[in-house]
Amino acid sequence: MSDCIFCKIIAGRGSSQLLYQDELVSGFRDHHPVAPVHVLVVPNKHIASVNDLTSEDEALMGHLVTVARELARQEGVDRSGYRLVVNTGPQGGQRVYHIHLHLLGGRQMQALVGSMD
Ligand code: 5GP
Ligand code: ZN
């Protein structure tokens, strides 16, 4: 996808330096971090969102999590803990429609508690 910012970064044509790349996935720092460690892990193939995944992508998504775990170790947050987030669609807070895993760590995350009121 030529107009996708994450496809550009994966191809080495974006402003973000890659932290990790293999034949299936890439990792790079979020340019507006919300935690001391904020890395995005993305498939090299353009998939817009979780809603666009097919059964053929199951191994790819498993690999995405494995790479996120490895990057958490590299970033030194594997023991302290971290959060993996995949925002999906407008109410899920997704802004970039190339599926990505947020790896967030280095500070205390709040529990997902709230009220429906
Ligand atoms: P979303 O809201 O779609 O789950 O997350 C998109 C994330 O991508 C945001 O946290 C935003 O800061 C990050 N982002 C958007 N454009 C760029 C970019 O050009 N480079 C990098 N490194 N991060 C980006
Ligand atoms: Zn893309």
Image (cartoon, grey):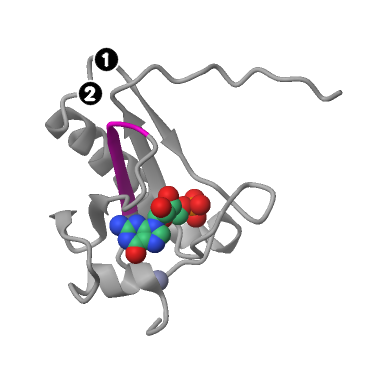
Identify the residue shown where x is 34% and y is 38%. Answer: 103
Separation (CA) of disc 1 from disc 2 = 5 Å
Q: Which residues are magenta?
A: 35-41
Q: Position of residue 32 (x, y in %)?
A: 36, 49
Quick check: 6 left or right of 114?
A: left
Location of residue 61 in the rendering, given as x and y in whole percent from the top left corner: 39, 49
Secondary structure state at the residue bearing disc 2: loop
The label number, if any, that marks residue 80 in the structure image: 1
Magenta segment: does it hold 40?
yes
Residue 86 location, x and y as percent?
49, 45
Badge 2 is on which residue?
77
**Residue 71, disc:** none
Q: Residues within 10 Å of mark 2 (few under 14, many from 20)?
A: some
Quarter, ligand 2: bottom left
The answer to whether residue 59 is above or below residue 83 is below
Tell me which residue sits at (34%, 42%) in the image: 33
- Image quadrant where one finds the N terminus: bottom left
Figure quadrant of residue 81: top left
Q: Quadrant where the C terminus lies?
A: top right
Task: Tell which of 16 and 44 is nearer to you.
Answer: 16
Instruction: Tell me what residue is drawn at x 39 percent, y 43 percent.
Output: 102
Q: Is residue 66 left or right of residue 97?
A: left
Secondary structure mostly seen in magenta is strand
Front position in the image: 56 or 10? 10
Farthest residue to the right: give it.
117
Residue type of the residue flagged with mark 2: Val
